[in-house]
Image (spheres, rainbow, N blue to C red):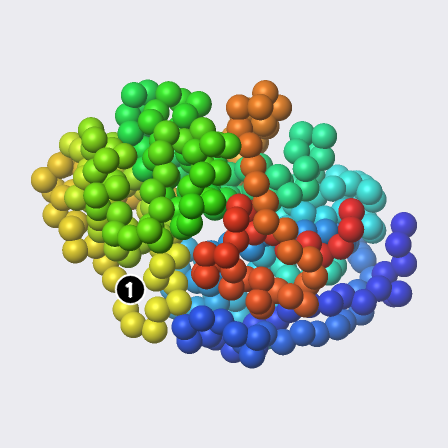
Amino acid sequence: MTTTTSLTNHQVRLAARPVGMPTRDNWRFTDEPVPPLTDGDVLVKTLALSLDPAMRGWMNEGKSYIPPVGIDEVMRAGGVGVVIDSRNPQFPVGAHVSGSLGVQTHCLVPGADIRRAGLAPIDTRVGSLTQWLNVLGMPGMTGYFGLMDVGQPRAGETLVVSGAAGAVGQTVGQLAKILGLRAVGIAGGKAKCDWVVNELGFDACIDYKAGPIKDALRQACPNGVDIYFDNVGGEILDTVLTRINRKARIVICGAISQYNNTTPVKGPSNYMSLLVNRARMEGIVVFDYADRYPQAITEMAGYLREGRMKSKEDVVEGIDTFPETLLKLFNGENFGKLVLKVADA
């Protein structure tokens, strides 16, 4: 059992709402003593944090699917850690857990907030800590339910996924192949595209940095697109809409190309293709499926164990690097799921 009075919690708080790309000035670093626990509480030492494009939206004021992070609040982030003190028999000391831990070195979860924080035990025999932030974590859940419930895949169809080398994209494409679909990725740079095809088993991958993707998309999808899983929005979404088949499903997961705009978000000008092709466009918010996470985790853990699915994580060390590390998502610098290592296991 740890004596909390001797512990200092290093935190990253939102100091000001960013305009355009966030900078270090948008953050405030604080040190606070960890308070004593009361009945039901759990104290978690943060080991690693998931850095995701959605975090940019959480910094903005305004209505969304989740309340924004308040000014001077600890920045919201999913993470994995180890229980170092507990007044809750469901979370014994030494247990590994995942949940909404925030960008901080320690997270004291009050007993009344266990469910809200999504605190849950994880089994490191099933997957590594970083895999619990990737294919077995929120990105994997997003890919699974976005494809299975919204995309409604059928064997023999053609799926296209943007951000194919990222956390969600790698899961979507591999799951599509397991289900018997043709999987085409869109990613930035030859190295990422080669990895998507040669390591993950996609049928093709389009390098959007090599030029306009219209011709490459026609070549990679000669029979059109049945499912498009969109992580980037903007021009890529607009281009894919010109290639969709009748009754196509467009899964809107994110729009990373638009998150740091200082002008209004650019909507798809080719949306009439949805009408012509009797197609459907629908959003996916992973929190809607929280009660079904165990189902998806069990299934994809099996794929990992059998070698039918792989995962790649891009790990950066040090909580003090958070402002700069987060920007890797928006500069296209991360290769795989972006993870911030906070402490050794």
Residue 32 found in image quarter: bottom right
Q: Position of residue 305 (x, y in %)?
A: 62, 24
Q: Position of residue 66 (x, y in %)?
A: 45, 57
Give the residue at x 48% y 67%.
Answer: 59
- The amino acid on which the numbered mark 1 sits, given as a three-letter code, is Val
For the view shown, which residue lies furthest in the left direction? 276
The answer to whether residue 229 is seen in the rendering is no
Compare residues 124 and 83 and report the one nearer the observer.
Answer: 124
Looking at the picture, does residue 269 appear above or below residue 192? below
Compare residues 45 and 4 and report the one nearer the observer.
Answer: 45
Looking at the picture, does residue 307 appear above or below residue 205? above
Q: Position of residue 1 (x, y in %)?
A: 90, 50
Looking at the picture, does residue 168 appear above or below residue 109? above
The image shows a total of numbered marks equal to 1
Q: Position of residue 340 (x, y in %)?
A: 64, 55
Compare residues 177 and 220 and report the one nearer the observer.
Answer: 220
Residue designated by label 1: 265
Compare residues 109 and 137 and report the one nearer the observer.
Answer: 137
Give the residue at x 42% y 41%.
Answer: 193
**Is 244 left or right of 138, judged from the image as shown?**
left
Q: Residues within 10 Å of mark 1 (few under 14, many from 20)?
A: some
The answer to whether residue 231 is seen in the rendering is yes
**Is 261 left or right of 308, judged from the image as shown?**
left
Give the residue at x 41% y 25%.
Answer: 177
**Is 160 left or right of 111, judged from the image as shown?**
left
Q: Secondary structure at mark 1?
A: loop
Give the residue at x 14% y 44%.
Answer: 273
Residue 190 found in image quarter: top left
**Is 46 left or right of 302, judged from the image as shown?**
right
